[in-house]
Image (cartoon, rainbow, N blue to C red):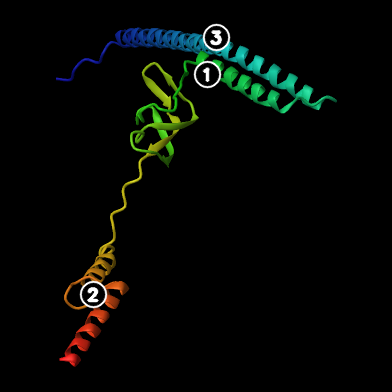
Amino acid sequence: MTPAPPDTGEVLEALTLLAEQVAREHERAGHREQIIDRLHAENQELRHGLLQEALTPVRAGLYRLYDTVHREAARWRGPETPSAEHVGALLEAIAEEVAEVLARTGAERVEAAPGDPYDTALHRPVRTEPVETGRDGLVVAVLADGFATGDRVLRKAGVVVGRTPAPVPPLPGAEKPEAEARGARGGGGGGGGREERPEEKAAERRGTAARNGDEGNV
């Protein structure tokens, strides 16, 4: 028995409902994408604002550093050249300004000093220098300060470390010639006796001559 053909009206109604559902889902998906895009843009703006806010004190320090260097450059170009002592103070002031800028970014200076024990967690050995006993393993000089943020070391301090030279052992046979020389001085003359002095030899000759004269008179 041949089945009855489906009702065309029911099929069209079902397709219409399906198309409406797909359209609603597409609309909701588009709305979700808009929300995601807006949140992403707001997040980027927030991050940019936080970055700019964090850079504000850094810029302020760099502005001061720029003004200092620019002002000193004008002084050095002027008719009166500053004295050599002024150069050291100027460079020290610039270094302190840079350290302050680094501190505003969270990089605090960790100062090392001569006499401190060498610490592999804080110090970077640049070279070693020979020192006397008792100063082995101590910092002799500081070539560069270190920086840290909290407990995290960002850069180790560059230091010169003192090392006590190891004693040099004597070469094999180095004392043998001296011992032989002492033996030759003590054992010369065949019997191990001491060498006779000239006055002793003269007295012995006079005694021999006297005995010979006595024998001739007998």
Indicate the secondary structure of the residue bearing disc 1.
helix
CA gap between label 3 and label 1 equals 16 Å
Q: Which mark is residue 102?
A: 1
Indicate the secondary structure of the residue bearing disc 3.
helix
Residue 206 vs 40, above or below: the answer is below
Residue under pointer 3: 53
Residue 129 vs 200, above or below: the answer is above
User: Which numbered disc, 1 or 2, marks the residue that appears first in the sequence?
Assistant: 1
Residue 164 vs 14, above or below: the answer is below
Which of labels 3 and 1 is toward the front? 1
Residue 126 vs 203, above or below: the answer is above
Amino acid type at image mark 2 = Gly
Indicate the secondary structure of the residue bearing disc 2.
loop
User: Is residue 94 left or right of 172 when viewed as pictured?
Assistant: right
Task: Choose top left, top right, bottom left or bottom right for residue 12.
Answer: top left
Image coords of residue 135 (percent x, y): 36, 33
Instruction: Identify the image quadrant of the N terminus.
Output: top left
* Residue appearing at x 19%, y 91% in the figure: 217
Which of labels 1 and 2 is toward the front? 2
Which of labels 3 and 2 is toward the front? 2
User: Which numbered disc, 3 or 2, marks the residue that appears first in the sequence?
Assistant: 3
Task: Choose top left, top right, bottom left or bottom right for residue 172.
Answer: bottom left
Residue under pointer 2: 188
Image coords of residue 166 (percent x, y): 32, 47
Amino acid type at image mark 3 = Glu
Amino acid type at image mark 1 = Leu
User: Is residue 43 left or right of 11 when viewed as pictured?
Assistant: right
- Of residues 184 and 162, the one drawn nearer to the viewer in this rendering: 184
